[in-house]
Amino acid sequence: MDILELVNFYIIPGIVLGSIYALGAVGITLVFAILRYAHLAHGDLATLGAFVALACVTALGISPLLALPMAIVATAAVAVGIDKVFYEHLRNRPKIVTVMASLGVALMIRSVIQVVWGVDTQTYSRGIVRPEDYFGLRIRDREFYTVFAMLLLVGGLQLFLTRTKWGKAMRAMSDNPNLALLSGIDNKKVVMLTWLVAGGLCAAAGYFLGLNTELKSLMGWSMLLPMFAAAILGGVGRVEGAVLGGLVVGIAEELSVLWIPSEYKAAMAFVILLFMLLVRPTGLLKGKVL
Amino acid sequence: MSALLSMENLTGGYGDADVLEDVSLHVDPDEIVVIVGPNGAGKSTAMKSVFGLLTIRGGRMLFDGEDITTWAPNRIVQRGICYVPQVDNIFREMSIHENLEMGGFLKKGDLSAAYDRVYTLFPDLKERRKTPAGRLSGGQRQMVAMGRALMLDPKLLLLDEPTAGLSPKYMEQIFEICRDVRDTGVAILLVEQHAKQALAFADRGYVLAAGRNRHEGSGADLLADREVAEMFLGG
């Protein structure tokens, strides 16, 4: 196999898949760092985002790309709502209670999706898209959009976190929650912002997974493990680490089929997760140890 | 002159256990007051009680003529008391400048005057303003912590063992800075483990033992007191 073939069939799909994981992992890492629990409904929230976009496409007849912002806004709002209705009451209880509650929320979201949209697979647009040829590199438009949108969204988030007062407040809350309170930072607002960001990114992850493959009610759930692996690989609390982690997990999954049967592709994320927890639990870019 | 802060017959603690019993103390404007005492005497607890961080069962606390006994911490911050905890008192991952910015979070409008004031007190910090605070030495971290607390122009600064774990050189420097801060019109209440040095530099002191007031007086008087000397100062 020549190098071009390797890039076209494994590396490019790996980067695309990795970008999707990255979008989810950034939200997971923020929730982990600021709220200090693992949010198990993250995958199903991504599924919801994907189906909301589908609803916009079918009901309004708009192009799938225009449906993305709508899905982001709607899912961000749902994420804030879920926090208010379920997680907020558990804030002073042991964190494991919230983790379990998020598992319940995951099942609830999935059931709602199955009731509304059914259990069959669906797509944003029918037909086969042929990749364009760029000097031997074969890339589909949607693959460009995926990587580009990920870089744009995460870049925007980084600017928000490092340049704005409320972005810095989010970092302060992740860094030292007690001191943040002593400084008079309103933790309720920070929590709300965290959910807006995490929910919005989740919708983008689900949407691009749907755009590059197909929509089904279990699509997000099956993405949960790779997203967590990416977040931990990158270092909990590190946004750029989550992106790096996402790309590594995505590429590793695609490359793994060279040596192992493709049914075991998903096990790669698990292997990476275990390996990191054993060897370097702070992640590639030094994150928190929880 | 009426006291800036006065704690009147305060009884309270964490959960159900009382750590403080009938403690009274006061801080006047423009003075440095130190609380000393053996380990477990309730020194830090007395300080946290000002900040509404424990359950108070008796007595009351007045600040600038207002009863603040039951206020939430963020309201107390806004009223003009800032607190520097003993440990975890900086945002490690954030730069010095960002630490100060978070200290001034509640302030509306321009922060530049507040930055100037803090950087004038701590010129070392200005040079390294982009450095993550977690990379600084112990003494400089303490400066960041104090600087963060000074961003809101408090009337009273609470310092919980600011010299813990610092070398004698840095201890002197921190005391020096405390005097400078006082001279800008901020009263300071601090808890100290290094009783001798602290009493020598403070305007007044309280000796706390087993959750109660034992002695009160000017630093020099307490240092000269035989009983105090025997209790904590090693004769």
Image (cartoon, coloured by chain):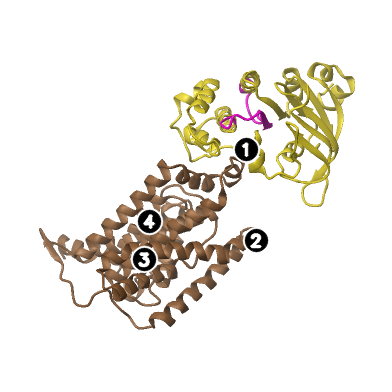
Labelled disc at residue A245? 4
Q: Which residue is mark 1?
A: B78
Q: Which circle, 4 or 3, is nearer the viewer?
A: 3
Where on the picture, by quarter, is residue A43? bottom left
User: Chain B appears in which tint?
Assistant: yellow
Task: State the CA–CA distance, disc 2 to disc 4.
Answer: 31 Å
Q: Are marks 3 and 2 in contact (CB under 8 Å)?
A: no
Asked if the magenta segment contains residue B163, the reply would be yes
What amino acid is labelled 1 in the image?
A: Gln
Q: Quadrant of the image for the N terminus of chain B? A: top right
Q: Position of residue B116 (x, y in %)?
A: 50, 24
Q: Which circle, 2 or 4, is nearer the viewer?
A: 2
Task: State the CA–CA distance, disc 4 to disc 3.
Answer: 25 Å
Disc 2: host chain: A
Where on the picture, by quarter, is residue A246? bottom left
Considering depth in this image, is A7 or B128 the residue closer to the camera? Answer: B128
User: Chain A appears in which tint?
Assistant: brown
Q: Are marks 3 and 1 in contact (CB under 8 Å)?
A: no
Q: Residue at x 82, y 27 (%)?
A: B232
Q: Residue at x 70, y 40 (%)?
A: B51
Labelled disc at residue A268? none
* Vertical position of residue B193 compared to residue A68: above or below: above
Q: Secondary structure at mark 2?
A: loop
Q: Which residue is mark 3?
A: A71
- Which segment did they paint magenta? B150-170
Q: Give the mark nearer the N terminus: 2 vs 4.
A: 2
Q: Position of residue A34 (x, y in %)?
A: 52, 52
Examine the rendering and report whether any part of residue B86 can be seen: no
Q: Give the mark nearer the N terminus: 3 vs 2.
A: 3
Q: Which circle, 1 or 2, is nearer the viewer?
A: 1
Do marks 3 and 1 both belong to one polypeptide chain? no
Do marks 3 and 2 both belong to one polypeptide chain? yes
